[in-house]
Image: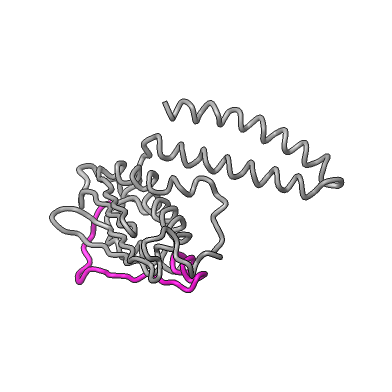
Amino acid sequence: MLRNFSHHCRNSLSAIKLGLYLLKRQGESSAPSRCNELWRKYEEIENLFDRLQRISQTTSLTVVRSPLGQLFAERLPLWRARFGDFGRSILVDPPEHELAGDFDPTHLGIGLDSFIAWRSHSAQAQSPRLAWRVARGQCEIAWTEARAEGSNGNTRASSCRSEPQPTDSSASLALLLLARVAADHGGEVEASQGHALDVTIRWPQFRVELTRR
């Protein structure tokens, strides 16, 4: 149902995009700020439906056999930069011995990028711990958030009240996107939220049919 609904809306968005393009050509000289605001709102809606499409349909994976540490080495600078904007950091807990597993680095990377971008705007995620391992025939990634100091159980810590809010309305779908990524890998996501959010994603270490790059 969501896939059909999303497809119908994307057709309508294509017509709106053409109209906005024509409007922008006519209105840039008279009202450039209004045109820019319309484009920004349109892009937010388009991003929302892109995210819904990723969640609602299975993605064909291009799987490699590699240690997860290689993926994190590539992406950690970007993730830490997001948290560094507010004086925070990501604590990394790698395994003692890296073992290879099967995964699609692009698909998994998109899911993790989206999830961490979402969490970077949460005052609860002060110094989250990122761990990964291969155990009992499964790849596992764990994200653990410590309770923010001074939060006293509140949803947001007082020291972070001035922090800017994400404008992308699709950010709240990040956990569902991560669950879609896990399902495409034959796995699952477990999440629990009390004073902070803990998320674990796991999937089989090896696929029966492996498509190598």
Asked if residue 107 is positioned above or below residue 5 in the image, the reply reads: below
* Residue 86 within the magenta-colored segment of the rendering: yes
The picture places residue 83, in percent across and down from the top left corner, at 46, 67
Which image quadrant is residue 135 in?
Answer: bottom left
Quarter that holds the N terminus = top left
Q: Is residue 24 left or right of residue 185?
A: right
Which image quadrant is residue 211 in?
Answer: top left
118 vs 17, nearest the viewer: 118
Asked if residue 64 is positioned above or below residue 83 in the image, the reply reads: above
Query: Quick one: which residue is furthest to the right in this view?
Result: 30
Residue at 13% from the left image edge and 55% from the top image edge: 136
Q: Is residue 138 left or right of residue 87?
A: left
Coloring applied to the structure = one colour
The picture places residue 86, in percent across and down from the top left corner, at 50, 70
Query: Quick one: which residue is furthest to the left in this view?
Result: 136
Asked if residue 144 is positioned above or below residue 211 in the image, the reply reads: below
Query: Quick one: which residue is furthest to the bottom in this view?
Result: 87
The picture places residue 31, in percent across and down from the top left corner, at 82, 46
* Residue 187 within the magenta-colored segment of the rendering: no
163 vs 35, nearest the viewer: 163
Q: Is residue 28 left or right of residue 128?
A: right
Task: State the count of labels.
Answer: 0
Residue at 70% from the left image edge and 43% from the top image edge: 38
Q: Which residues are magenta?
A: 78-102
Q: Is residue 174 left or right of residue 35?
A: left
Residue at 58% from the left image edge and 40% from the top image edge: 45
The picture places residue 32, in percent across and down from the top left corner, at 80, 49
